Amino acid sequence: MHPKTIISDFKSLGASFSVEGDELYINNPANIYPELEELAKGNKSRIVTYLKGEYSDKEHNVKQTIDKIVDFYREGCRIDSKINDWLQNDVEGLNLVMDLVVEFSRNGWTLVDPVCNFENKITDEMSKEIYERAMTYFKKGAAAG
């Protein structure tokens, strides 16, 4: 989910965010549900980056793609998915995904966590490379179809 969507949803409930350094604070937290507070915590780093004006649409596309790949694994690797098709046909891409998951794990991530709070410069670079490989594959598929 794009950070601006989360911010907008909170605003519609009468809550907002403030940032001090890299810390995120919810203003009027009594106006939101506990599940929304958990959503904000799970997306803290992206919300902070967005509120600082450092989150581009391109960056969002990369991060959203990685989120979808992680969800693919959480959901049991559906064989009828586009992600499965891509990874079956791009061994180097698959290896990059596995390396990325290991790097997230080194940062403290587990499969039940959102990855965004475990990203760093290394995972960002790996994510960009995975994104480019995936987009190249899907554009070839669209051109062939």
Image (tube, grey):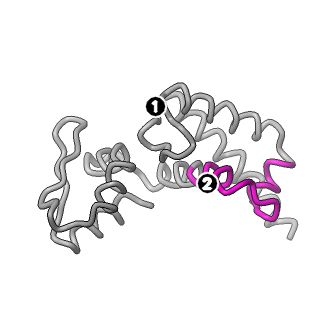
| Residue furthest top in the image | 106
Q: Check disc 2: other Cα within 10 Å, few if <14, some if 14-19, many if 20+.
A: some
What's the residue at 18%, 48% (across, down)?
Answer: 25
Residue at which label 1 appears: 120
What's the residue at 22%, 74% (across, down)?
Answer: 12
Q: At which x and y percent is residue 7?
A: 28, 62
Principal secondary structure, stretch drawn in magenta: helix
The earlier-in-sequence mark between 1 and 2 is 2
- Nearer the observer: mark 1 or 2; the answer is 2
User: Foreground: 39 or 62?
Assistant: 39
Label 2 sits on a secondary structure element that is helix
Residue 54 magenta:
no
The image quadrant of residue 33 is bottom left
Q: Check disc 1: other Cα within 10 Å, few if <14, some if 14-19, many if 20+.
A: few
Quadrant (top left, top right, bottom left, bottom right) of the C terminus:
bottom right
Quadrant (top left, top right, bottom left, bottom right) of the N terminus:
bottom left
What's the residue at 66%, 42% (across, down)?
Answer: 130
Q: At which x and y percent is residue 40?
A: 32, 54
Instruction: Name above or below for residue 53 compared with residue 138.
Output: above
User: Foreground: 32 or 98?
Assistant: 32
Q: Which residues are magenta?
A: 67-88
Q: CA distance from mark 1 to mark 2?
A: 20 Å
Instruction: Name above or below for residue 84 compared with residue 30.
Output: above
Residue 68 magenta:
yes
Q: Which label is found at residue 71?
A: 2
